[in-house]
Image (tube, grey):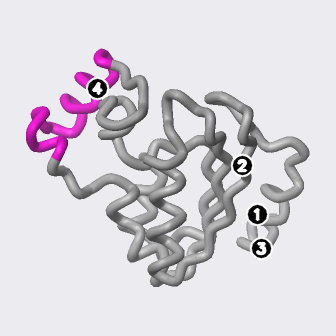
Amino acid sequence: MIAYNWAAVHPDRVAGIFADIPVCDFKSWPGGYGRSLGDANEWRRCLLACGLDEASALRFGGNPVDRLAPLAAAGVPLLHAHARADPLVPFDENTGVVAERYRALGGEITVIERPEAGHAPGVDPPDLVIECLRRCGAE
């Protein structure tokens, strides 16, 4: 979330984003509003860090899923590794939303899925990540 929020403010300084199981909406995790198991302690910490109460957090429009337009307009390519079976950071509440919205904005996103993996899919072999970095000019 931190990388996405920084990039949304500085899209001209970002060549690309690789995210491994990214939290893209804190209402999903740690909030637990949806299919995520959530984490009550982390949710309280999140609310405190953001200066929000429960009600304002549920209306909050500053999560990565809400701030994709500047990245798409700047042509920033995205690469996500995710697992559909992740019980903590559900695909359809995080990467799935980002992919749908980013493509609708004309952005380029590649999603590496490991359907049976849980919360730690990783990328093995790392060829797609290396290729993404090369395309972004980060050799």
Q: Is 90 rendered above or below residue 3? A: above
Name the N-terminal-most of marks 1 and 2. 2
Q: Main secondary structure of the magenta part?
A: helix
Question: Are dots 3 and 1 in contact, CB under 8 Å?
Answer: yes
Name the N-terminal-most of marks 2 and 3. 2
For label 1, the crowd category at 10 Å Cα-Cα, with few meaning under 14, some 14 to 19 and many 20 or more, is some
Mark 2 — residue?
113
For label 4, the crowd category at 10 Å Cα-Cα, with few meaning under 14, some 14 to 19 and many 20 or more, is some
Q: Which region of the structure is painted magenta? A: 40-58
Mark 4 — residue?
43
Name the N-terminal-most of marks 4 and 3. 4
For label 3, the crowd category at 10 Å Cα-Cα, with few meaning under 14, some 14 to 19 and many 20 or more, is few
**Amino acid of disc 3:** Arg
Residue 71 coordinates in the image, percent (x, y): 47, 73
Residue drawn at x 27%, y 56% is 62
Mark 1 — residue?
133
Q: Using the numbered discs, state the Cα–Cα distance from disc 4 to disc 3 in whole angstroms.
A: 36 Å
Which mark is in front, 2 or 3? Answer: 2
Q: Using the numbered discs, state the Cα–Cα distance from disc 3 to disc 1 in whole angstroms.
A: 5 Å
Residue toward you, 41 or 99: 99
Q: Using the numbered discs, state the Cα–Cα distance from disc 2 to disc 3 in whole angstroms.
A: 20 Å
Give the numbered dot on residue 135. 3
